[in-house]
Image (cartoon, rainbow, N blue to C red):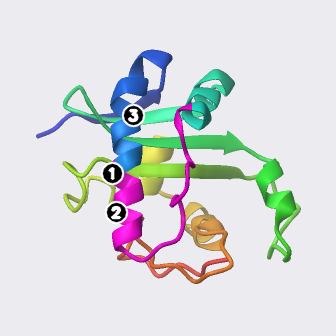
Amino acid sequence: MSLIYIRQATKNDLEQIMPIIDEAKKFLKEEGNPQWQSDYPNVETITADIEEGVAWVLIVDQKIAGYTAITDGPDSNYKKFDGKWNNDLDPYVAIHRVAISDEYRGMHIYDDSVNVLTNFSVFPAQIEKLADFAAVSPAQLKNTIVPNVDLNMF
């Protein structure tokens, strides 16, 4: 059985994180997803995440297998969107820049992504909130994060 956990990323992890980001960009392009098809996210983005203390790495058997940034709202990125949230009063956590290494994609090590990301038991309210905010995009994108869960995209 594999040892799987998350930990906060450090600058020493950049050399392993950036190839994972590049693999995710390629994967998104192949899926027809327009996100990440420019210079974003780049080393400056990930470095800023690390410096802000919001960068996390997924570890599988002592190897970095994935990356994400987890911010405790309010998130300034969401002020730029033209639209209305179902609920804009409750506090929230935003999960950004989720990327998994090609080596682990399809292995379903993230099937219980809410549990992996929070290290708590899965609560129905977490799944409901994930569904509310899974993809903030003007396009209805394919759910590649948790494909077995029907999510109502923003």
Label 2 CA crowd tier, 10 Å (few <14, some 14–19, many 20+): some
Label 1 CA crowd tier, 10 Å (few <14, some 14–19, many 20+): some
Residue 80, how many percent across, how many down?
85, 62
- Mark 3 and mark 1 residues within 8 Å of each other at the beta carbon: no
Nearest the viewer among 72 and 64 is 64
Magenta extent? 23-43
Q: Which amino acid, by three-letter code, is at mark 3?
A: Ile
Identify the residue under disc 3. Answer: 17
- Mark 3 and mark 2 residues within 8 Å of each other at the beta carbon: no
Quadrant the N terminus occupies = top left
Identify the residue under disc 2. Answer: 27
Residue at the outermost top position: 12
The answer to which quarter of the image holds residue 42 is top right
Assign a secondary structure to mark 1: helix
Q: Which amino acid, by three-letter code, is at mark 2?
A: Phe
Residue 77, how many percent across, how many down?
78, 54
Point out which mark residue 111 bears.
none
Q: Is residue 109 magenta?
A: no
Can you say whether 117 is above or below 61 in the image? below
Nearest the viewer among 33 and 123 is 33
Q: Earlier in the sequence, mark 3 or mark 2?
A: 3
Point out which mark residue 23 bears.
1
Can I make out residue 120 in this image?
Answer: no
Q: Is residue 25 magenta?
A: yes
